[in-house]
Amino acid sequence: MADLIISLLPIFLVFLFTSTTVEPAFHRRSRTRAYVEVSCQVTKYPHLCIRCLTAYVHSSNATVLSPHQLVQYALLASQHRAQYTRVYLLKLSKELKDNNGQEYQAVKDCLEQIDLSVDQLSMSIKEVRQLSREAMLSRDDQFWHISNVETWVGSALTDATTCLDEFPGRRMSKLKATVKAKVLNVAQVTENALALFHLFAARYRAPGVTKKL
């Protein structure tokens, strides 16, 4: 069933956004949500993907999305979660520094990994924006930008997962459980963003396909 959804996804997305009819804002928002819901089916955490992206799109007052825009929103949402978690960990590390050596070290190590995730996601967003200049890019340049994004988002996911390794098992303090939950959210949102980017990038790799951002 999942394979069928994925195989029909490009057809549905084209149908959904080829209409040029002017329509009320409510209908455009409904179509945007439908677009997000269908796109998120390729991710590992579709419900989180839908909840995260619809909230982010709504806050940005976006109503019509292209695949390129969707990928940008997914990466921006991931970056936002990582930045929020970084601020939390930075504050927490300062509070623990003089009081709890063991938990301080775990939080400090985790903060370093999330710092890297934020930087890598920021670079990835810039690369995706470069792809909006498609008419000015050679095919090799397009693949170069795509490879950069896949590498950096993959690294951001690895760094978040490495942070989770600081908190093994299920029995832990409330503080560690809170940190783990926040970092797990970053990892899951980032993994979803990577899946959406893979779907977007596949359009470039398909021979003879005309791409529309």
Image: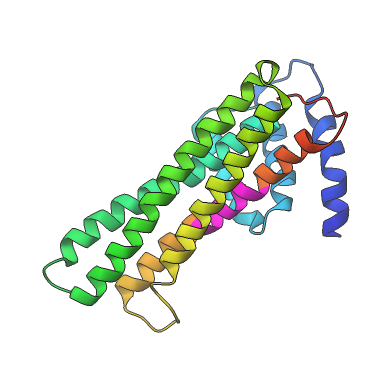
The residue that appears at 81% across and 23% down in the rendered structure is 18
Q: Residue at 58% of width from left, 49% of height from top?
A: 51
Picture coordinates of residue 80, whole percent (x, y): 43, 43
Would you place residue 125 above or below residue 191 in this image?
Answer: above
Q: Is 85 displayed left or right of 122 in the figure? A: left
Q: Residue most toward the bottom?
A: 171
In the rendered image, the vertical position of residue 185 relative to residue 96, given as above or below: above
Q: Position of residue 140 (x, y in %)?
A: 70, 29
**Residue 189 inside the magenta-drawn segment:** yes
Coordinates of residue 126 in the picture (x, y in percent): 51, 31
Residue 185 shows up from this direction: no
Pick the residue in front: 170 or 202.
202
| Residue 204 appears left or right of 82 | right
Whether residue 135 is visible here, answered yes or no, is yes
| Residue 48 against residue 97 in the figure, above or below | above
Q: Quadrant of the C terminus?
A: top right
Viewer-nearest residue: 164 or 136? 136
Q: Is 154 a magenta residue?
A: no
Residue found at the far front of this picture? 140
Residue at point 73% right, 27% down? 139
Side (left or right) of 127 relative to 112: right
Q: How is the image coloured?
A: rainbow
- Residue range highlighted in magenta: 187-195
Residue 160 percent coordinates (x, y) = 46, 59
Placement of the N terminus among the 4 image quadrants: bottom right
Q: Magenta stretch mostly in which secondary structure?
A: helix
